Image (spheres, coloured by chain):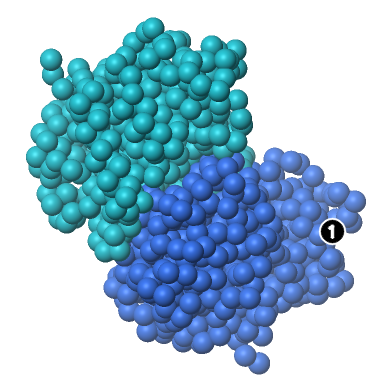
Chain colours: A blue, B cyan
Amino acid sequence: MTTEGQIDFFFKPESIALIGASPNPKKLSFTILENLLKMGFQGKIYPINPGYQEIRGLKCYPAPDEIKDRIDIAIFAVPASTVLEILNGHVENIKGAIIVSSGFRETGPEGKEMEIRLKEILEKKGIRAMGPNCLGIYDTVSKVDTFFISSDKVERPVRDGVSVLTQSGSFAAMIMDEMANEGAGISRVVSYGNKVDVDESDCLEFLAGDEATKAVALYIESVGNGRRFLATASECVQKKPVVALKVGKREPGAKAASSHTGAISGRYEAYEAAFRKAGVIEVESYEELKDACKVLNRYPLVRGNRILIITDGGGIGISIADACEEAGLKVPDLSKEVMEKLEKKLPAFASVRNPVDLTGNVKDEHYIDALQEAFGEEYDLAIVSLLWGPPLLSKEVAEKIKAFAIHCEKPVLICSPGGRFSREVASAFTAIGMPVFFTPDSAVRAALVLCGGKK
Amino acid sequence: MTTEGQIDFFFKPESIALIGASPNPKKLSFTILENLLKMGFQGKIYPINPGYQEIRGLKCYPAPDEIKDRIDIAIFAVPASTVLEILNGHVENIKGAIIVSSGFRETGPEGKEMEIRLKEILEKKGIRAMGPNCLGIYDTVSKVDTFFISSDKVERPVRDGVSVLTQSGSFAAMIMDEMANEGAGISRVVSYGNKVDVDESDCLEFLAGDEATKAVALYIESVGNGRRFLATASECVQKKPVVALKVGKREPGAKAASSHTGAISGRYEAYEAAFRKAGVIEVESYEELKDACKVLNRYPLVRGNRILIITDGGGIGISIADACEEAGLKVPDLSKEVMEKLEKKLPAFASVRNPVDLTGNVKDEHYIDALQEAFGEEYDLAIVSLLWGPPLLSKEVAEKIKAFAIHCEKPVLICSPGGRFSREVASAFTAIGMPVFFTPDSAVRAALVLCGGKK
């Protein structure tokens, strides 16, 4: 049996027990049960709490071993000391645990002691565990949602291809919420907190072979076993792109990371080297990781780094070109042949260069003309930026660009800067599965990731 | 008479003529008149078009000289050749022109020829002019809006303190739209396009003495008269902060800038040196300029660069700390004394360091406790980051933080990451005049600007 086999039940559970289940809306466990039900999990759900006979129409059990069934995931939503107590009891039927409770290593010496005991018990009983001090799993494939935050507060993204691994629960919530807000989806999210057992390497091993996952995004404060991480990350990169954000790079971020999930961040340079060796694309910021997730949902990496820019706003085109050059991407000019062809097709005042500026006289079809004539062998990726001011530009341009993009082997990234109206019309793109970037900078961050990241 | 006196009528006009006015909604001039009326301009508005007696209830004149009044601003919304024709005629009563028409230098040799003639005529007649190939003025002080883009498509920000100067009209539209969308306001926006006459230096001179303008943000493709720019920018910096984004830094952005407004960008290094000499804070990207505008609406620059971070999400705190360090800002730890005080006041598992992590057990008052105890002499600026998941955190925290911020001499920046819900509750801050930043990166970009930009 491979290690992968050891944790895959977390991602295709048939039964979930919720230890500490409660009908009290002020309890975290209340929200967890609500989210599980809302998500439409198709397996069995067992609330566990000796104080209740039934919660939300589900039979409630006094203890795990009263359930005459194997429990794939037991969510522990009880105080730290109670976690230990229960695990010390009869729990022979639990395969995996998600311990959302805090009060362990992240709180100081006493908590650290408890976490050491937790680890011993888990090993003795052969229970695999995520957490403690985590949110657990949000999974659009298996329909599992163990997050103790209501979907009113943190929106849940729809299903798509990128899976996210993170030590930080707040990071998971932030990126999910913002991606949902921007019309982007996700595959699986794992927040594993203090990593008493399951860590990024375990998850990477599973995700490498996971057909539902097209790419992996990592938020890393620290890695415990560097050698294993290097091996599993390298193997995963063979199959799909892996991007990583390392935080706690220097003092004092490093110090904060240590207190946050009780880990030691280690020297940043070691991480940098490991990423490079494994072929992991390192991103520099939260925003870049989010942009990476959005773009990797739809597009694979490209080989070169030559960017074609098409816009209807001169200033935006220049800003994109500048940001590309700044990031080390190339913005080669059009060939003479292409220029001549375009001059015949585009509006009178159009600028037939790279960036191609279709100006305020643009019509929908000019975007397609420009893509068809200019997006040839000389370019690896196109950024198409649309300002919606021009009177003859319509929402229908989305379908037209999609029709082109579908038959194009190379990525076409959409940039639609601005506010309310711009986001509304941009939904014409997200509705048909094309990610939209709302600033020039954001589109370039996404392009950079597809080109393999900063060199 | 100073040069300043020469263009101030653009910012306090008593009469505006719209040349090319039309009741046809497909014409740009239709939208301009609509926007002027919507904005509530209190002076006289004279539509000019020989084909109409009246437009939207306003008497329509066949030509400028039929108006027996001085025209402070004549907006030209007619083809390039017609602009020249009209200016060659009887226009003795026009003080200033805003020529929104394109078809001049940006289109090639013929257009360039026309622009040279335009310049000659303007000088001969003593008419000051903005444009051509521009959007003109959006002014929340004088209630002027000459933009030919409907407010349905590009939202208009409310009144606030930052004025924006830009060659690019699309840039003006983008930043206005997004700022309005994020609840941020603006003072005056000038899009001067090809700069046949009025340029950044003229505007800087006016804005330096303008009481309604607290700070100036510049989008620069090129500067014609470097010496004058250096002088006017230096003088303006003595009175209020000036931030600048230079685009077209390198080939090919530089080439695109040249075609866009017909200007030559010049070597970037010269701009860099001029900014430094004048004390202009240079920003690196569109996003940074937008963040600068938001933060300068409310806060003056600070002297140091020591940042206090308070958060309820560990991962966010670390991301902010990392981004600070990356940008060259300092995140010094709390003093022992402060730590001890905070330990007594904050939730049990709180991390009493910098970043202060109040955790998911946070209550509203903990933010105030942390600010009161920790935001002492050791720090120049605080970033307060709120995740809205914690059950005991309420919207009322906004009023409480504001009450603290008002009596605090140093800036308190709010970071509220996430999507729909987060933006909704964040409006509690924007409603009381505190800018909100929606990602860790964005909050740090704003902090960097207040600390004087990248060193």
Location of residue B246 in the rendering, given as x and y in whole percent from the top left corner: 26, 49
Quadrant placement of the C terminus of chain A: bottom left
Specify the quadrant of the image occupied by residue B280.
top left
Q: Residue at x 47, y 70 (%)?
A: A341
Image position, residue A9 (x, y; %)? 71, 77
Q: Residue furthest top?
A: B68
In the rendered structure, the answer to whether residue B154 lies left or right of residue A319 reads: right
Q: For residue A43, what is the image quadrant?
A: bottom right
Q: Residue at x 27, y 58 (%)?
A: B254
Left or right: where A268 falls relative to A393: left
Residue B121 coordinates in the image, percent (x, y): 25, 30
Foreground pick, A134 / B216: B216
User: Which residue: 53% across, 83% down?
Assistant: A236
Inspect this view and state whether residue B63 appears.
yes
Tell which of B296 and B429 is nearer to you.
B296
Question: Is residue A283 or residue A35 the one in the foreground?
Answer: A283
What residue does disc 1 label?
A61
The x, y position of residue B137, in whole percent, is 38, 28
User: What's the chain of the residue with tag 1?
Assistant: A
Rendered position, A308 above or below B322: below
Residue at disc 1, secondary structure: loop
